[in-house]
Amino acid sequence: MSLGITVRGLDIPDSVRAPLTEDDVAARLVGKDATLWGPDAESESAIRLGWLDLPASSRELVSQLADLRAELTGEGLDRVVLCGMGGSSLAPEVICRTAGVPLVVLDTTDPGQVAAAMADLDRTVVVVSSKSGGTVETDSQRRAFVQAFADAGLDEKEIGRRFVVVTDPGSPLSETAAAMGARAVFLADPNVGGRYSALSAFGLVPSALAGADVGTLLDEAEELAGTLAQPDNSALELGVAMGAAFRAGRDKLALADGGSGIVGFGDWAEQLIAESTGKQGRGILPVVLESVDAPGASGSDVLLAVVGPDAPATEPAIGVTGPLGAQFLGWEYATAVAGRVLGINPFDQPNVTESKENTQRILSEGLPDERPAATIGAIEVYGSGGVLDGVDLSSHDGVVLAVDALLASIPPRGYLAVMAYLDREKDATAENLRAALARRAEKAVTFGWGPRFLHSTGQYHKGGPQVGAYLQLTGAIAQDLPVPDQAYSFATLQAAQAGGDRKALADRDRPVLHLHLTDRAAGLGQLLSALT
Ligand SMILES: O=P(O)(O)OC[C@H]1O[C@H](O)[C@H](O)[C@@H](O)[C@@H]1O
């Protein structure tokens, strides 16, 4: 069995399973029946089911990529940097971390983190991945690398040879790739959405160039693919469990690793589930946990999903065993099935553009002139949505009081999202806030690095149930970095992204507490010691 599902302590009523069996959903999904999600979703679904073919159709890439890797390493280019957001970087990150091969994933606008990725240029090849070819972060990173190579003395032709591009046919990036003389361009199947693209060129190109065995990954997926038309297949069972939990009010899916050997799977599944289901005022909120017994593993609105063989520490829970290739395909299939149970279109992301449009507006009009309500130690405190009303910010405990006011504003069955527009290498301790706040709030707490989460849980924040409270962290910039040939720098872009998302949340009257760290390390230390 390529994927094993164990369900514990979760009642799966016939009202969830029977319609799927009666409507022959398993076979129809494998047959790419675009009517499965209702008439409103049909036109989108018709061009989004290509992921079902990938275990077979991506085969041709395996030998091409082995040849390209040999060519690159033969020239001493053995350091691979991937510029890409969301569906264009999350899968390669899991594949390479699991395989233990080095891949530098750049999915940020933090100037410090971007600058740090531009090291060892003499052995670096850059993979620029974007399905749409218009994602501002990815385009900005590409520009910065072109400039860095030029500064290192490479001529135009040599610079082009340092780039490998993955995009959809006809995208603006495909034209840029041709114009800059990229060494290789991989055009992906346009009938595969970004978050379903793990087994496409988006997942495979950077991973194979970094040294991962992508042929085996496809073998693992193909074994599962052969079972997916069966009415009781394991991936269908996973989707049924997700849908049944949702119907029973368990709309938080806590994701934890249980000895799978897969590294960072939750971050990939988070985008798949949040963007696919979080819309029309409903959705399943993925909550990535540090371990099976981390705070947030249980609760009246939680279903725990353990990836790997370890027994869950709590119930209800589902256990999902199987190798990475099968996990990718199985969760994609399960999410499509859950989408039908929830009654949403699992292939669009209707609210992602809001924050992007706000960001563009800020970039053209300039950053708003905001004054903090207080500055306490290394933290400036800003709030909207009434979150600071009545909070005494004059005391040394002001930050904790503000955080507690934010936590108190979370409605029953609500959640807190921590959104850190920081450097995920240098400011990594920010991640410890999730467990600390989950313990304190006794509610679901998610953690996301900005702007990366905008391409993942950001859809759920805006399109899902309006029961969220938001803690946004930004930090001082030690050294800014220009975005070549653009009117803005990385620091401005990062600030505009944070501001654009704050506005999208404020427009919904959601409570947002914004803490700006005037000294990142000191501010994080201050926050963590106050909250733990
Ligand atoms: O691959 P790209 O076109 O650059 O898109 C990257 C990401 O952008 C958007 O935010 C979408 O909501 C994501 O689903 C997608 O993965």
Image: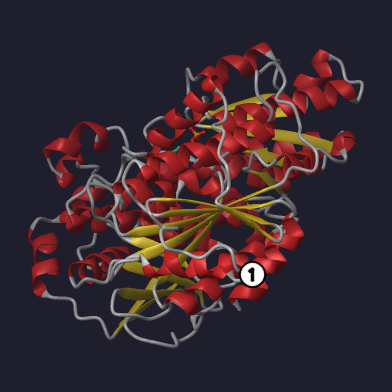
- Circle 1: residue type: His
Asked whether mark 1 and ligand 1 are closer than 8 Å, the reply comes as no
Q: Where's residue 65, x and y in %?
A: 66, 38
Q: Where's residue 12, x and y in %?
A: 18, 76
Q: Is residue 28 above or below residue 161?
A: below
Q: Quadrant of residue 306?
A: bottom left
Q: What residue sits 63% from the left and 14% below the top? A: 178
Q: Quadrant of residue 166?
A: top right
Q: Residues within 10 Å of mark 1 (few under 14, many from 20)?
A: few
Q: Quadrant of residue 191?
A: top left
Residue farthest to the right, as pictured: 153
346 vs 218, nearest the viewer = 346
Determine if residue 76 is in view: no
Q: Is residue 397 above or below residue 378?
A: below
Q: What residue sits 92% from the left and 21% below the top? A: 153
Q: Is residue 129 above or below residue 259?
A: above
91 vs 105, nearest the viewer = 105
Q: What residue sits 48% from the left and 74% below the top? A: 438
Quarter of the image with the C terminus in it = bottom right
Determine if residue 514 is in view: yes
Residue farthest to the front, as pictured: 394
386 vs 23, nearest the viewer = 386
Quarter of the image with the N terminus in it = bottom left
Q: Is residue 389 above or below residue 45?
A: below
Callout 1 secondary element: loop
Q: Where's residue 104, x and y in %?
A: 72, 47
Q: How many marks?
A: 1
Q: What residue does disc 1 label?
A: 396
